[in-house]
Amino acid sequence: MMNSTETGKRYAPLILTLGLDEKSQDFFDHLRERYFPPKRNFLQAHLTLFHHLPGRERRTIENALAATAVQRVPLSMKATSVKMMGRGVAYQLDSKQLKDIHEKFSLEWKNWLTPQDQQKLWPHVTVQNKVDTAKAKALYNKLSDSFEPFEVKGTGFRLWAYQNGPWEWLADFDFAT
Protein backbone atom coordinates (compact mmCIF):
# COMPACT_ATOMS: atom_id res chain seq x y z
CA MET A 1 0.00 0.00 0.00
CA MET A 2 1.36 3.39 -1.00
CA ASN A 3 1.55 6.11 1.65
CA SER A 4 0.85 9.77 1.00
CA THR A 5 4.50 10.61 0.38
CA GLU A 6 4.67 8.23 -2.58
CA THR A 7 3.48 8.96 -6.09
CA GLY A 8 3.90 5.79 -8.09
CA LYS A 9 7.60 5.08 -7.67
CA ARG A 10 8.43 8.72 -6.96
CA TYR A 11 8.53 9.81 -3.33
CA ALA A 12 7.40 13.34 -2.52
CA PRO A 13 10.19 15.57 -1.17
CA LEU A 14 10.08 16.27 2.55
CA ILE A 15 10.16 19.70 4.18
CA LEU A 16 11.31 20.13 7.77
CA THR A 17 10.13 23.13 9.79
CA LEU A 18 10.44 24.20 13.39
CA GLY A 19 7.26 24.41 15.46
CA LEU A 20 6.76 27.70 17.30
CA ASP A 21 5.12 28.51 20.61
CA GLU A 22 1.44 29.41 20.36
CA LYS A 23 1.85 33.16 21.02
CA SER A 24 4.58 33.53 18.38
CA GLN A 25 2.71 31.33 15.88
CA ASP A 26 -0.41 33.48 16.29
CA PHE A 27 1.62 36.69 15.89
CA PHE A 28 3.30 35.55 12.66
CA ASP A 29 0.10 33.96 11.29
CA HIS A 30 -1.78 37.23 11.81
CA LEU A 31 0.85 39.17 9.85
CA ARG A 32 0.96 36.55 7.13
CA GLU A 33 -2.84 36.54 6.76
CA ARG A 34 -2.83 40.33 6.56
CA TYR A 35 0.12 40.87 4.20
CA PHE A 36 0.74 37.71 2.18
CA PRO A 37 -1.08 37.65 -1.19
CA PRO A 38 -4.24 35.60 -0.49
CA LYS A 39 -3.96 33.59 -3.72
CA ARG A 40 -0.48 32.43 -2.63
CA ASN A 41 -1.07 32.01 1.10
CA PHE A 42 -1.60 28.26 1.51
CA LEU A 43 0.40 27.78 4.71
CA GLN A 44 0.69 29.02 8.23
CA ALA A 45 3.77 31.04 9.09
CA HIS A 46 6.76 28.73 9.46
CA LEU A 47 10.51 28.54 9.96
CA THR A 48 11.96 26.16 7.38
CA LEU A 49 15.01 24.12 8.36
CA PHE A 50 15.29 21.97 5.21
CA HIS A 51 13.43 22.56 1.95
CA HIS A 52 13.90 19.26 0.10
CA LEU A 53 14.78 16.05 1.93
CA PRO A 54 14.34 12.75 0.07
CA GLY A 55 10.95 11.13 0.69
CA ARG A 56 12.46 7.68 0.25
CA GLU A 57 14.45 8.36 3.46
CA ARG A 58 11.36 9.30 5.50
CA ARG A 59 11.78 6.58 8.16
CA THR A 60 15.46 7.42 8.72
CA ILE A 61 14.63 11.12 8.97
CA GLU A 62 11.74 10.49 11.35
CA ASN A 63 13.96 8.34 13.57
CA ALA A 64 16.60 11.09 13.74
CA LEU A 65 13.96 13.74 14.52
CA ALA A 66 12.37 11.62 17.25
CA ALA A 67 15.75 10.85 18.87
CA THR A 68 16.74 14.53 18.84
CA ALA A 69 13.36 15.87 20.00
CA VAL A 70 13.20 13.75 23.17
CA GLN A 71 16.59 15.14 24.24
CA ARG A 72 15.58 18.80 23.80
CA VAL A 73 13.59 21.29 25.77
CA PRO A 74 11.93 24.13 23.84
CA LEU A 75 14.55 26.29 22.13
CA SER A 76 15.00 29.91 23.11
CA MET A 77 15.22 32.17 20.09
CA LYS A 78 15.16 35.90 19.64
CA ALA A 79 13.50 37.81 16.84
CA THR A 80 16.33 40.22 16.13
CA SER A 81 15.13 42.27 13.17
CA VAL A 82 12.75 42.73 10.26
CA LYS A 83 14.40 41.95 6.92
CA MET A 84 13.59 43.07 3.41
CA MET A 85 13.67 40.12 1.00
CA GLY A 86 13.29 41.91 -2.31
CA ARG A 87 9.64 41.08 -2.94
CA GLY A 88 8.75 40.31 0.67
CA VAL A 89 9.43 40.77 4.36
CA ALA A 90 10.55 38.38 7.10
CA TYR A 91 11.46 38.37 10.77
CA GLN A 92 14.99 37.15 11.39
CA LEU A 93 15.43 34.83 14.37
CA ASP A 94 18.62 33.95 16.17
CA SER A 95 19.43 30.85 18.21
CA LYS A 96 22.75 29.11 18.64
CA GLN A 97 20.90 25.96 19.72
CA LEU A 98 18.91 25.93 16.48
CA LYS A 99 22.02 26.47 14.38
CA ASP A 100 23.74 23.59 16.23
CA ILE A 101 20.78 21.26 15.55
CA HIS A 102 20.75 22.30 11.88
CA GLU A 103 24.49 21.68 11.59
CA LYS A 104 24.11 18.23 13.19
CA PHE A 105 21.40 17.24 10.69
CA SER A 106 23.33 18.81 7.81
CA LEU A 107 26.31 16.57 8.57
CA GLU A 108 24.14 13.51 9.11
CA TRP A 109 22.18 14.06 5.89
CA LYS A 110 24.92 15.69 3.78
CA ASN A 111 24.62 13.20 0.91
CA TRP A 112 20.92 14.03 0.51
CA LEU A 113 21.01 17.81 0.62
CA THR A 114 20.19 20.03 -2.33
CA PRO A 115 22.38 23.10 -2.92
CA GLN A 116 19.73 25.25 -1.19
CA ASP A 117 19.80 23.03 1.91
CA GLN A 118 23.60 22.95 1.98
CA GLN A 119 23.66 26.69 2.65
CA LYS A 120 24.15 28.15 6.09
CA LEU A 121 20.86 28.35 8.00
CA TRP A 122 19.19 31.77 8.00
CA PRO A 123 16.34 31.31 10.51
CA HIS A 124 13.41 33.51 9.55
CA VAL A 125 9.65 33.61 9.31
CA THR A 126 8.28 35.15 6.11
CA VAL A 127 5.18 37.29 6.59
CA GLN A 128 5.00 38.67 3.05
CA ASN A 129 6.33 37.38 -0.26
CA LYS A 130 5.78 37.65 -4.01
CA VAL A 131 4.55 41.24 -3.99
CA ASP A 132 6.01 44.18 -5.89
CA THR A 133 9.06 45.76 -4.29
CA ALA A 134 7.30 49.03 -3.43
CA LYS A 135 4.65 47.15 -1.43
CA ALA A 136 7.34 45.08 0.31
CA LYS A 137 9.37 48.20 1.12
CA ALA A 138 6.28 49.89 2.60
CA LEU A 139 5.61 46.92 4.89
CA TYR A 140 9.29 46.66 5.80
CA ASN A 141 9.30 50.35 6.82
CA LYS A 142 6.06 49.97 8.80
CA LEU A 143 7.23 46.88 10.72
CA SER A 144 10.79 48.16 11.22
CA ASP A 145 9.64 51.48 12.69
CA SER A 146 7.95 49.77 15.62
CA PHE A 147 10.20 46.71 15.91
CA GLU A 148 11.62 45.68 19.25
CA PRO A 149 13.39 42.33 19.70
CA PHE A 150 11.23 39.63 21.28
CA GLU A 151 11.50 36.04 22.46
CA VAL A 152 10.25 33.08 20.44
CA LYS A 153 10.27 29.44 21.49
CA GLY A 154 10.95 26.52 19.16
CA THR A 155 8.68 23.69 20.30
CA GLY A 156 9.61 20.79 18.03
CA PHE A 157 10.02 19.58 14.48
CA ARG A 158 7.24 19.48 11.86
CA LEU A 159 7.65 17.16 8.87
CA TRP A 160 5.78 17.80 5.65
CA ALA A 161 5.50 16.24 2.18
CA TYR A 162 5.69 18.66 -0.73
CA GLN A 163 2.77 17.91 -3.05
CA ASN A 164 3.66 20.05 -6.10
CA GLY A 165 2.52 23.23 -4.37
CA PRO A 166 0.60 22.42 -1.20
CA TRP A 167 2.32 20.84 1.78
CA GLU A 168 0.88 17.76 3.45
CA TRP A 169 1.53 17.48 7.19
CA LEU A 170 3.10 14.13 8.09
CA ALA A 171 4.28 14.24 11.71
CA ASP A 172 5.22 16.37 14.71
CA PHE A 173 8.21 15.68 16.94
CA ASP A 174 7.68 17.83 20.03
CA PHE A 175 10.57 18.71 22.31
CA ALA A 176 10.48 17.42 25.86
CA THR A 177 8.91 19.79 28.35
Image (cartoon, rainbow, N blue to C red):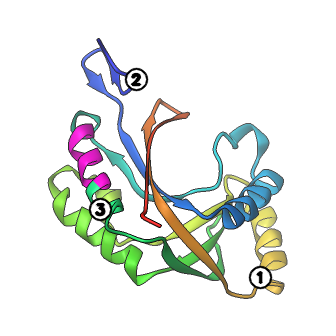
Position of residue 31 in the picture relative to residue 63 (left or right): right
Q: Picture coordinates of residue 118 (x, y %)?
A: 28, 63
Residue extending furthest toward the top: 1
Q: Earlier in the sequence, mark 3 or mark 2?
A: 2
Q: Residues within 10 Å of mark 2 (few under 14, many from 20)?
A: few
Q: Residues within 10 Å of mark 1 (few under 14, many from 20)?
A: some
Q: Of the numbered discs in the image, which one, if any, rests on residue 68?
A: 3
Position of residue 97 in the picture relative to residue 135 (left or right): left
Amino acid type shown at disc 2: Ser
Q: Earlier in the sequence, mark 3 or mark 1?
A: 3
Amino acid type shown at disc 1: Ser
Q: Give the camera-side residue of 7 and 23.
A: 23
Q: Nearer the viewer, mark 2 or mark 1?
A: 2
Q: Find out whether the residues at labels 3 and 1 contact each other: C-beta distance under 8 Å.
A: no
Q: Residue at x 83, y 55 (%)?
A: 34
Which residue is label 2 attached to?
4
Which stretch appears magenta?
58-66
Residue 62 on the magenta span: yes
Residue 152 on the magenta span: no
Q: Picture coordinates of residue 89 (x, y %)?
A: 68, 67
Position above or below: 49 against 166: below
Which residue is label 1 attached to?
144
Q: Of the numbered discs in the image, which one, if any, rests on residue 1?
A: none
Q: Give the camera-side residue of 116 and 25.
A: 25
- Residue at disc 1, secondary structure: helix
Residue extending furthest toward the front: 177
Q: Picture coordinates of residue 85 (x, y %)?
A: 61, 68
Measure the C-alpha gap from mark 2 to mark 1: 41 Å
